[in-house]
Image (cartoon, helix red, strand yellow):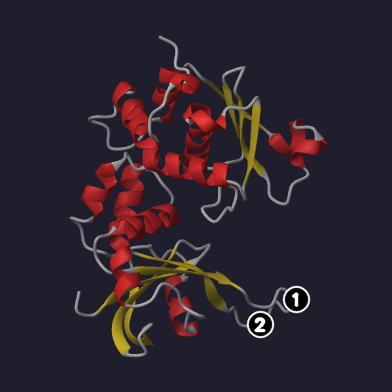
Amino acid sequence: MEFKASYLEIEPRELIEFLLRESGHADREAVNPKSILDVLRLEHVTANFAAELPPELTQRSTPVRGMLSYRDRIVATDINLNGTRARFSVLHEVAHYVLPTHQHALYVCDETGMSFRTRVTIEQEANAFAAELLFLGDRFTSEVNSRPLTAATIKLLAQKYQASFEATARRMIERSLRPCMLVVCDNTGSRVDPDAQPVWSKKYTIASVPFRTKYFSDLHSAVIPPDVAAQVLAPGRDIADSVTHEVTIRTATGTDARFRAEFFSNTYSIFCLLRPTAN
């Protein structure tokens, strides 16, 4: 029987369970996008989007990562994507294909649309669906709540689920039943003076429900201490070889609380995993 999303009045969770079951993921440790494409009878191709797409499709603020031709049943991803980004891009286009309200002739999805901070509703829905597939539904949730909240756990789960460190870290916080916050910092130092000291400041934060309920949901500002940045960015340093300090932060109620701040880096960003010292 051919899959036709327009005929299905079911919830995204049911679709996810169906796809994982029918594509044989009961015993897999990581999602196999090819097996999901096979269930849906979709073809996957790669292309050099910058060179091969017409200008009206490539003149965007960020590069195109994936495309779906609904009628042709083709999912295309940019040939220059690394493994983890290509896998997520395929799953993102699968989401556009199966979600009943996403049926259109052509989807062209760029870096902004596939960012978890996109404000476009259908892209948010596609990202959420793709993440559920990438992390095998509730399996990741069960696993993350049975392991320590550490950079070493993020590395282990990223390798196991074949996801990026940043996506895995975000997922860990989102699915944690324990109080924790992830602070992601980018280099915001001088773009003009190459000799200026790098400044790693907050790009965004994400907090677990217990954390934002008891402490705060965001930080007004955050800057990584230069000595810590130098340590975690040292050439060859492993993401699991983190640097830990205790810090005091004022909570939403105006009281001070002590937190264990664990710093680590994937070389592109510096992360700080905050946990109350009592946990």
The residue under label 2 is: 196
Give residue 46's quadrant in the image. Answer: top right
Q: Is residue 137 above or below residue 237?
A: above
The three-letter amino acid code for the residue at tag 2 is Ala
- Horizontal side of 180 relative to 264 (left or right) equals left
Near-viewer residue (115 or 191): 115
| Identity of the residue drawn at 30% across and 86% down | 257
- Write down the residue under mark 1: 192
Circle 2: is it few (<14), some (14-19), or many (20+) Cα within 10 Å?
A: few
Mark 2 and mark 1 in contact? Answer it, CB < 8 Å: yes
Q: Position of residue 42 (x, y in %)?
A: 51, 19
Seen from the viewer's position, the closer of residues 145 and 44 is: 145
Where does the image place residue 184, in percent across and percent down from the top left? Answer: 47, 68
Residue that lies at the very extreme toward the top in this rendered image: 1
Q: Residue at x 53, y 62 (%)?
A: 268
- Asked if residue 57 lies left or right of residue 46, the reply is right
Measured from the top left, where is residue 207 in percent x and y?
38, 66
Q: Secondary structure at mark 2?
A: loop
Q: Is residue 92 left or right of residue 181?
A: right
Q: Nearer the viewer, residue 123 or 108?
A: 123
Where in the figure is residue 145, as x and y percent of width and height?
21, 56
Q: Quadrant of the C terminus?
A: bottom left
Q: Is residue 22 above or below residue 17?
A: above
The kind of secondary structure element at disc 1 is: loop
